Image (cartoon, rainbow, N blue to C red):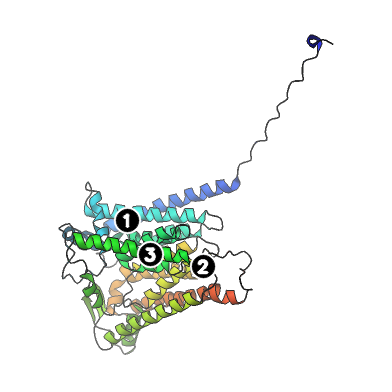
Amino acid sequence: MTPSQMPPPPARVRIPAPATAPDPGAFDRRARAAALVAIWLATRAVMLHLLVTDRLGVRGVTGEVSVLYRRWHEQLSTGSFPFGDPTWQYPPGAGALLLLPSLLPFLTFFQAFTALTALCDALIARALLRAGARPGGSGAGAWLWVCGLPLLLHLPYARYDVQVTALAVGALLTLRRRPGLGGVLAGLGALVKVWPLLTLLGAPPGRSARRALLGALGSAAALLAVLALAFDHTLDFARQQGSRGLQIESLGGTAYQLAHLLDGRPGRVVHRYGAMEFSGPYASALAVLSLALSGLALCWLVFWRLRARRWTVAVPLDAALCAVLLFTVTSRVISPQYLIWLLGLAALCLTSRRTSQRAVAQLLVPALVLTSLVFPCLYTQVMAGTVLGTVLLAARNALLLTAALLSCRRLWTSTVTAHTTTSAGTAEPGQRSWGSPHR
């Protein structure tokens, strides 16, 4: 058969590829993210409305920004930190943060400060959402932040603690893969309000912890040097901070007020250093006792660090929440904005399914509600030492104390006790060790 007579080759039959089925999990994630964005927009609109009207309780919540922060901003713009001002009790990094509204010259100081606060709020929510989408993560953290912050009403937008919380959240989220950068963010946060330095407490032992610590020291020293060269009276805040007394909202203040309530005479309240403090017999002794308890809390945290042997991806988050809780409940001052810190750290813990602090985060939700009742809604009752005001404050502080003790117990159990009940060098099923003392 000649080539011309050969039959043509059979045509290739193309079999269509099977259609890819849509991923229901991806659709659900997008739907939940869209719902979270909608809730964020709705709740933040309400918070901004409350901020502008400022009619709840004692009012004057916005005065912190429109009067006090603005005055500090104007003085910082002249090249000097507030000097001899008893209300200035913050590390010099706070001055740099208060100058940021100058980046928006087309807005008033109040508008620019609020816009930057809302931006940091949104960045925290986005960071928590992304952290929860990682393998082993959970979206509960983002939901806690978005739905929990409005429980403090408009207070978060009238303070700069959302910005500080953003630095702490960023430090903890980057600590795992880039410990040096996590340390840098923690150091910058510490120079604004000290407590973000506690985010390094749970850094895994070895090279990671050293890199994080060096990053924190380096960034804090660099920023402090720049501020010291550019401004006068950079360290004047330390003198004011050391003179603070027993604030009425602290645990010691609650005990003091309960004692006065039992004998029928309210404690004497005075306005000092920008806060309401008790003045009278034993008030100074209780303030000193609070400092001693803070020292004991630090000792316990160091002891835990030395004994801990089991490090998972959730340990740095859990340790940060535990440390800040301990220093909050033992402080001479528990301002309502402290709950912003605790909420951010609790939400960060819930982004990991391995966290030991889930029950602690649940206790903080009613504490947020009670905090808003204490300030600003019924603050006049608290200052007057009435039964209602004292009971509300005592209930809030009891929740915080319970949360702190429970946090310590769960952190210890998950990192120390759990290790002793498993074979050496192994982790429990479903858990992965992170770091090693031998690295």
Labelled pair 2, 3 in contact (Cβ < 8 Å): no
Identify which residue is drawn at 21% across, 63% down.
Answer: 228
What residue is at 50 percent from the left and 69 percent from the top?
357
Q: Identify the amino acid type marked 3.
A: Leu
**Count of all numbered marks drawn on residues in the image:** 3
Calculate the distance from the C-alpha at mark 3 to the C-alpha at mark 1.
Answer: 29 Å
Disc sitting over residue 214 in the figure: 3
Q: Residue at x 49, y 56 (%)?
A: 131
Alpha carbon distance from label 2 to label 1: 27 Å
Residue nearest the observer in this picture, 336 or 119? 119
Is label 3 in a helix, a strand or a loop? helix
Earlier in the chain: of badge 2 and badge 1, it is 1
Would residue 319 be found to the left or right of residue 257 on screen?
Answer: right
- Visible residue check, residue 43: no
The amino acid on which the numbered mark 1 sits, given as a three-letter code, is: Thr
Name the mark nearer the viewer: 2 or 3: 3
Q: Which residue is mark 1?
A: 117
Identify the residue under disc 2.
358
| Observer-nearest of 378 and 221 | 221
Q: Is residue 379 above or below residue 33?
A: below
N-terminal of the two: label 3 or label 1?
1
x, y percent for residue 433: 56, 65
Residue type, label 2: Arg
| Residue 400 location, quadrant | bottom left
**x and y percent of residue 242 in the render?**
25, 77
